Image (spheres, helix red, strand yellow):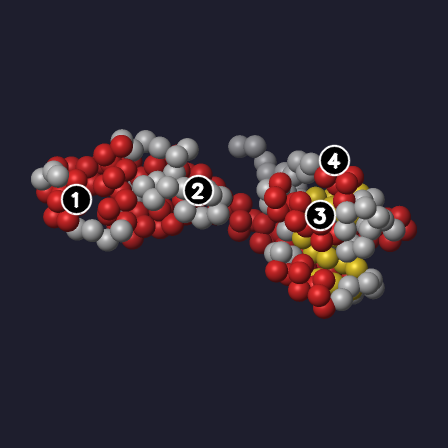
Amino acid sequence: MIPAKAPVIHVVDDDDSFRTALSRLLKAAGYATQQHRSAGEFLLDPPGAPGCVLLDVHMPGPSGLDLQEAIAKRGDGLPVIFLTGHGDVRQSVRAMRGGAVNFLTKPVERQELLAAIEEALARQRAQAADAGRRREAARRYARLTAREREVFALVVSGKINKQIGAALGVSERTVKAHRAQVMEKMEVGSVAELVQADGLMRERSHPGRPAEGPTE
């Protein structure tokens, strides 16, 4: 089994002395760190491991808020913690609406910062687990035939066998056979689990998914 990569805390701040001091604090706390002087520098060096981003708001070039949007669009899955000396209510609201874990002001208490980092890493682990479940559900769904996908869609919509048969123009016996294949291929033991798998595939990681199922 390949060991999981250790998380990396990315410190993005144009203040060299602050960035260095913060990295030393994090290393003393047991974290691996990587320093970036600007949003552009961070974007040119895609992360190769899980972690989070400690991000200043005001920097030359693209701001921290701009970088937060770019990280979301790129799909790195890295949670963001803002750490700034010049934040205001409007900026903090925008940051939190954009999914930031926290919006802290400098100077920050060590324990407050470490607690925010742990929260960010826990959030990322949960998101990674959800993504894994979505991929697995999509992999199983891909094994279904076209007819089985039709049955899948009707089952998760709450239709009973008689209604499904009428909708597809087949007998209830045929519906039961297809339904059994759907349950086996999706590796579920109940309609509730089938609905849960459908819900996973409908989440944001599958934009544009048609009603009958994912296209991947």
Give the amino acid at mark 2: Gly
Say whether disc 3 or disc 4 marks the residue closer to the N-terminus: 4
In the rendered image, residue 35, in percent from the top left (x then y), is placed at 80, 43
Can you identify the residue that label 4 sits on?
44
Secondary element type, mark 3: helix
Q: Secondary structure at mark 2?
A: loop
Residue drawn at 61 percent across, 44 percent down: 73
SS state under label 1: helix
- Residue under label 1: 167
* Residue 89 locus on image (x, y percent): 72, 68
The residue type indicated by label 4 comes to Leu
Q: Residue furthest right?
A: 17
Left or right: where 112 falls relative to 139: right
In the image, taking residue 6 as reference, residue 128 lies left or right, namely left
- Residue that mark 2 sits on: 208
> Which mark is nearer the camera, 4 or 1?
1
